[in-house]
Image (cartoon, rainbow, N blue to C red):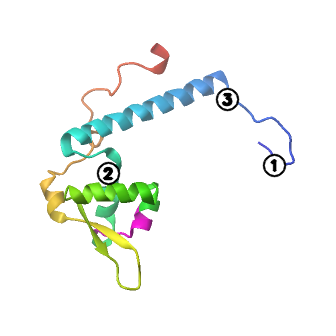
Amino acid sequence: MGTMGDMTEPRWLTDEEHHVWRAYLHATTLLEDHLDRQLQRDAGMPHVYYGLLVHLSQAPRRRMQMTELAKDAKITRSRLSHAVARLEKNGWVRRENCPPTSAASSPGSRTRAWRSSGGTRPATWRPCARPCSTGSPRSR
């Protein structure tokens, strides 16, 4: 695409590019759905919550400011606040006040909760025994 003053038409996807794009979207949706179902079954949490725990586990002292965690997880602060409230209610994290110089709060993961989870992780981190889908978008 050109600049604002350039009135050239945008280049649209070819039929083949469009097919590849739709197949990619379909595959990523299947993967996200599979991860969500498995984590709900195994740990009682959606995939996005697990991602937050991963971010916290890799942070110094397993603590991050909420704003930084939202940015790293690429979710809104509102969605993060809701997620952390649910994780806190279930004993996976706890909110802590930051030093008096900051008005922010920072969730920190509880080591006890990590241990009691039995090392919950998405199945895709283990070798897959079967494919996630039995057909491609083209075969439907």
Q: Is residue 36 above or below residue 70?
A: above
Q: Secondary structure at mark 1?
A: loop
- N-term-proximal mark, 2 vs 3: 3
Real-space CA distance between mark 1 and mark 3, rounded to the nearest whole angstrom? 20 Å
Q: Which mark is residue 3?
A: 1
Q: Which mark is residue 49?
A: 2
Q: Which mark is residue 57?
A: none
- N-term-proximal mark, 1 vs 3: 1
Q: Residues within 10 Å of mark 3 (few under 14, many from 20)?
A: few
Where are the magenta residues, as a range?
62-69
* Residue 27 place in picture, x, y as percent: 43, 31
Amino acid type at image mark 1: Thr
Q: Is residue 18 above or below residue 118?
A: above
Amino acid type at image mark 3: Leu
Using residue 116 as the reference point, say whether residue 131 is left or right of it.
Answer: right
Regarding residue 126, the answer to whether it shows in the image is no
- N-term-proximal mark, 1 vs 2: 1
* Residue 64 place in picture, x, y as percent: 36, 69
